[in-house]
Image (tube, rainbow, N blue to C red):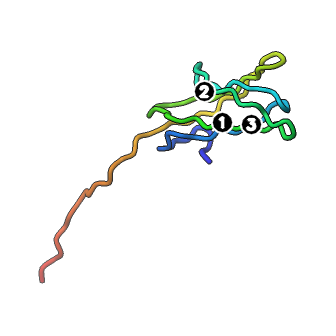
Amino acid sequence: EIPNGDTTVETSVTLTGTASKGQKVDVLDGAVSKGQPTADPTTGIWTLVVSGLSVAPHSFTAKALYGSGAVSAAWTLTVTALVAPTISSVKGSPSG
């Protein structure tokens, strides 16, 4: 799990949330819709895989596509680039 406000190198994430049973939500990254999953008719749980995330901050919300269109609190994360390993020092053994 990627904690809210944390960073990751993953460019594909699975978002999970809850809504009214059998109802659709619009999952947004900022103002951009990433998909409209339907909440399970028994549990109310929905999931959505979001792929192709850019190296940047992201702020996900879920907006109800029913009732008054309530919006969830944001779940934020930052995708960072993978960093290649480096060697920062080489020292010889003492002679003697």
Query: Which of the 4 image quadrants contains residue 74?
Result: top right
Q: Which residue is mark 3?
A: 46
Q: Which residue is mark 2?
A: 34
The kind of residue tagged 2 is: Lys
Dots 1, 2 in contact, CB < 8 A: yes
Dots 3, 1 in contact, CB < 8 A: yes
How packed is label 3: few (under 14 Cα within 10 Å), some, or many (20 or more)?
many
Query: Which of the 4 image quadrants contains residue 16?
Result: top right
Q: How much space separates mark 1 and mark 2, taking CA atoms?
A: 9 Å
Q: Which residue is mark 1?
A: 48
Q: Is residue 33 left or right of residue 46?
A: left
As drawn, 93 above or below 26:
below
As drawn, 55 above or below 8:
above
- For the residue labelled by badge 1, is the local secondary structure a helix, a strand or a loop? strand
Q: How much space separates mark 3 and mark 2, taking CA atoms?
A: 14 Å
Whole-percent x and y of residue 56? 46, 31
Whole-percent x and y of residue 25? 73, 26
Total numbered labels placed on residues in the image: 3
